[in-house]
Amino acid sequence: MAVPHCILYRDAEALPVDQDPRWALTAARAQGAMLWVTLVAPSIDDVKALGEALQLTPLGVASLLRSHQRSKLDHYDDQLFLALQPAQYDDDAETVQCHEVDIVVGHEFFVVISPDGAVDIDTMRTQLEQHPEILRRGPRGVLWATIEYVTRGYRDVLDGVEHDIDEIEEQLFGEDAGVSRRIFALQREVIDLQHATAPLEVMLSRLERIVSHSDRFAGAPAFHEITDRARYIDARVTAFRQTLDSALTVHATMIDQRRNDAMQKMTEDGIRQNDQVKKISSWAAIGFAPTLVAGIYGMNFRNMPELEWFWGYPFALGLMVAVSTALYFLFKRNDWL
């Protein structure tokens, strides 16, 4: 069972408060303060209990119960429900990991839920406490700071991915056998990163409209600067994906080229072997002709008329030369020699 962690902020000062969200919210309303609630790795019942304690809308609670969501924004009554995906780059493993964080913003409270416990919410909150001017703006100011924190975190991730792509380009032309596996793995990471970043521009534009048209959001910082950053992030991620698609195409082309070169070499070797076989066969046939004649006249049967013929020996030699010469020119004309 996950236990909510509650902190009360009044005029940017953290105050102790009852850890029961229901009573903590009552205290926040009584003191005109903001309630911060953190919930890490909750079960379904934990989320439902928190929703009941804070009087969250049923549709919003249902949204929180969906896991592995893309970045999104839902607006129910005076409550905002956001799903963000902060990203981290592991330098040692050279991998990108995206983790979901769910946020609920009400008039008096700010709720952060880490479904898998991978997001360091305490670090984010500690950094926020160093900027009391943001805390004084209430839950909407904290929301702005949270989105600012998440989007700025993409900078190191994008730089790490860009470095990996540069290495892949070197591996491509270095004929590294494992480059295809690395391209596919990085492409999967970039797709996950695109799921996290692509919706941000539309989300923030919508959020800015909500803020500007609601008196309840008065005093919240403007989101247009973060919207521009989100547009830039999405453009870089899209460029990464296109580059990796091109790398896969180039890799496939290079593999086909090497295969064609190997087939061409095999064909050329086969042709050379065939030429050699023809030459050997031709010379063997030429050499066989004198052997055949010599074998016939070397049998020495009594009734062979050539044995007693005065011209028999010159005739045999001439026949050998004539047959060999005829075969030589025949093979030569047919390009066997």
Image (cartoon, grey):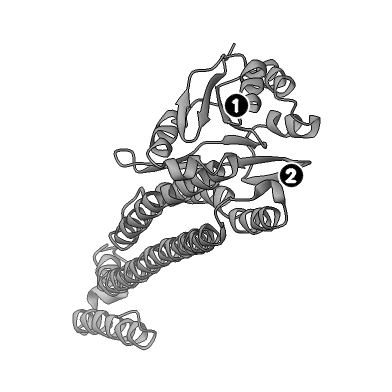
Residue under pointer 1: 31
Report whether residue 112 is seen: no
Residue 80 lies in quadrant: top right
In 3D space, how far apart are the residues under numbered discs 2 and 1 (Cα atoms)?
A: 26 Å
Q: Using residue 233 as the reference point, say whether residue 335 is left or right of it.
A: left
Q: Using residue 164 as the reference point, say whether residue 316 is left or right of it.
A: left
**Residue 335 appears at what percent x and percent y?**
35, 83
Residue pictured at 64% horizontal, 41% vertical: 82
**Residue 92 appears at what percent x and percent y?**
29, 38
Which of the two residues, 126 or 133, is positioned nearer the viewer here? 133
- The amino acid sitting under disc 1 is Gln
Nearer the viewer's eye, disc 2 or disc 1? 1
**Residue 31 appears at what percent x and percent y?**
60, 26
**Residue projecting furthest to the front:** 31
Residue under pointer 2: 75
Residue 142, placed above or below residue 332: above
Quadrant containing the N terminus is: top right
**Residue projecting furthest to the top:** 1
- The amino acid sitting under disc 2 is His
Q: How many numbered markers are drawn?
A: 2
Which of the two residues, 240 or 293, is positioned nearer the viewer here? 240
Residue 57, placed above or below residue 50: below
